[in-house]
Image (cartoon, rainbow, N blue to C red):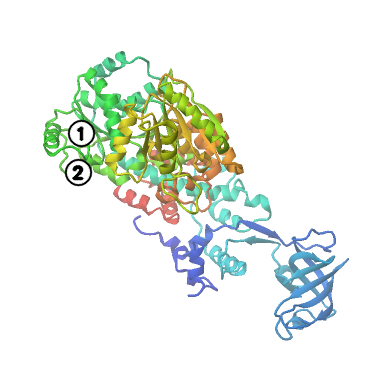
Amino acid sequence: MSTRPPILFPLFAGLETLPGIGAKTAPLFAQIGVERPRDLLFTLPHAVIDRRPVPTVQGVAPGTVVSVTATVRAHYPAPRRGAPARVLVEDARVEIQLVFFHAKGDWLERQLPIGQRRVISGKLEYFDGQAQIVHPDHILREDKADELPRYEPVYPLTAGLSQKLVGKAAAAALDRLPDLPDWIDPSLKAREGWPDWADAVRAAHAPEGLDDLALQAPARARLAYDELFAHQLTLALARRRTRRAKGRVSRSDGRAAARVLAALPYRPTEAQTRAVEEILSDMGSERRMHRLLQGDVGSGKTLVAFLSLLAAVEAGGQGVMMAPTEILARQHLEGLAPLAALAGIRLEILTGRDKAAERRAKLADLAEGRIGILVGTHAVFQKDVEFQDLRLVVIDEQHRFGVAQRMELGAKGAAVDMLVMTATPIPRSLALAQYGDMDVSVLDEKPPGRKPVKTALVSAERHDEVVEHLRRAVAEGRQAYWVCPLVEESELVDLISAEDRFRSLRAALGEGVVGLVHGQLPPADKDAAMADFVAGRTRVLVATTVIEVGVNVPNASIMVIERAETFGLAQLHQLRGRVGRGAAQSTCLMIYKPPLSEGGERRLQVLRDSEDGFRIAEEDLAMRGAGDMIGTAQSGLPRFRVADLERQAGMMAVAQTDARNLLESDPELAGPRGLAARVMLWLMEQDRAIRLMDVG
């Protein structure tokens, strides 16, 4: 089914085919994300107005929309230009003034003849104790009273669009609802008490109170599930395609790994052992591995990756480990070189700074298979970098590398296995939304011997005390990071720039003690400043968030974060993870500028009370929302119209299982439910899934 099914044609016609929408109004609808009748079906009302009639407005709170039958008593024309005309009407108990600005000619007399009864609906206000309704929404003769909607849905609007127009367009789109076979698993549908699709759409557009607007209302929950299911089915198809790509069986006898583990001063955690088993099982199978290794700061991802790379080499191949920056690549080299020596495997680094002759020699050794493991930066992507037999690619800090770059690396070998690592704990619902096409291993334990970092909140008024604390620590031979919010002076923002902080700390602590690294520095200067700090030549490193990811200086045991309230939770957690890597008790001082906003205070308290990155990530998601958390622009996160990723996280997991099971039982989507699911993918505009199916 590589073309849209005809049953959906009316929903994908032009918007102007709906009554009341022309060349002028169509662009306004586009501003609320509506370009075809189909989009109207998924643009649900966000509120509901209760227009059920009441006998009298007496005792009704101001600001409430009321509908009441009243007798017209008197007309008071506008006394002067710009002043309103007023009409006095009386319900069963009280008098109400109807107020009209700019009423034309005899329109009011025709609408509201004296002595007659009319049904009036609008927002009730009180002025000098007098009940009044300014510009009623509805004025109807008694015999037309049933034309008044009992519950009126409220749609999102933009300038130039009225509720009436959007409501009318939505009703017209609902008239086009096709009768589609159901794609939801019947037992799940029965268990949740969900309606059929068309009934769910109709019900969602006709709420009868606040309960019908809730996420868990059966109609809305059903439509949210449809979106999540369509998204997960797309990811499941992508995953199947990756898995169908023939892999290479890479099996090792584990001798090299045993030598390395025997020499380590600690035993791997159960989580590390489990992750290694999952990875080796993938590598030993016929399918290509596509796995995400998710672990909190300091959970030992690098060791897991290294043991996996050893297996690739022992199986007769080569492995490469990619880092997003040269600093990180060199750090991996320093950490892994002694382990590689124990295993008797040659490990080299390739970056953009290698001298020409040195680079040529390395490339020759790589192509001849003399180098077993390569650590590198983006330089590895270059055309002239060739492996003899690349089996495993490990990518550190996934979000710095795009999908296209993952593919490029994969193309450097035959059926390469791919292991992606991230130190950013992602709540499960987002991990499923972003990486649902991958298998996931989670490291949720810290290796033994890592002391928790003491975290304290310090008001900016106590700045001098912090500097004094630092002076004592430096005298004892300790090292510290001082993180500043912004690099450049900005007139608008009173954040202290890194340059200024560097100068003031140098004056307080002495020449040569303080280093500076920030995003505007040339790369060579940045690396030199980092190298000085790593080697202990400087004691305090003033930095912007460039040190956020992966830098490892065991002797650094103090982290000062200035204006901590301006950072996100995940960022603060990553920064704190830079200390607590050595034997000394580490502290993290979060300096904030009082008074804190409610959100700022909650963020800092969550950090003070927890070191569990996954818990912090869940809190972050609850506070900031999904798009914000990963920066939706580049997150690749789907934009859902009905589903709410934060509050319907559990549903995402159900959708993933459901989608994978459907493909398992009906790989070609040719059975009744499979065919229904194909129509759903077209309805949900999952074109990518449709292409994957056709290539399948």
How dense is the environment of label 2, judged by Cα within 10 Å: few (below 14), some, or many (20 and up)?
few
Q: Position of residue 463 (x, y in %)?
A: 53, 35
Rendered image quadrant of residue 609: top right
Question: Helix, strand or loop at disc 1?
Answer: strand
The type of residue carrying mark 1 is Leu
Q: Is residue 262 left or right of residue 173?
A: left
- Count of numbered badges drawn on the protein: 2
Q: Position of residue 658 (x, y in %)?
A: 46, 40
Quarter of the figure that contains the N terminus: bottom left
Q: Residue at x 33, y 24 (%)?
A: 303
From this view, report whether residue 591 is shown above or below residue 34: above
Question: Between 508 and 419, which is closer to the camera in this rendering?
Answer: 508
From this view, report whether residue 133 is shown above or below residue 678: below
From this view, report whether residue 251 is shown above or below residue 68: above
Question: Between 175 and 387, which is closer to the camera in this rendering?
Answer: 387
Q: Residue at x 60, y 66 (%)?
A: 167
Rendered image quadrant of residue 111: bottom right
Q: Is residue 270 left or right of residue 290?
A: right
Q: Which mark is residue 382?
A: 2
Q: Residue at x 57, y 37 (%)?
A: 461
Question: Between 395 and 2, which is closer to the camera in this rendering?
Answer: 395
* Residues at marks 2 and 1 touching, judged by CB atoms closer than 8 Å: no
Q: Which residue is mark 1?
A: 390
Question: Helix, strand or loop at disc 2?
Answer: loop
Q: Position of residue 515 (x, y in %)?
A: 36, 35
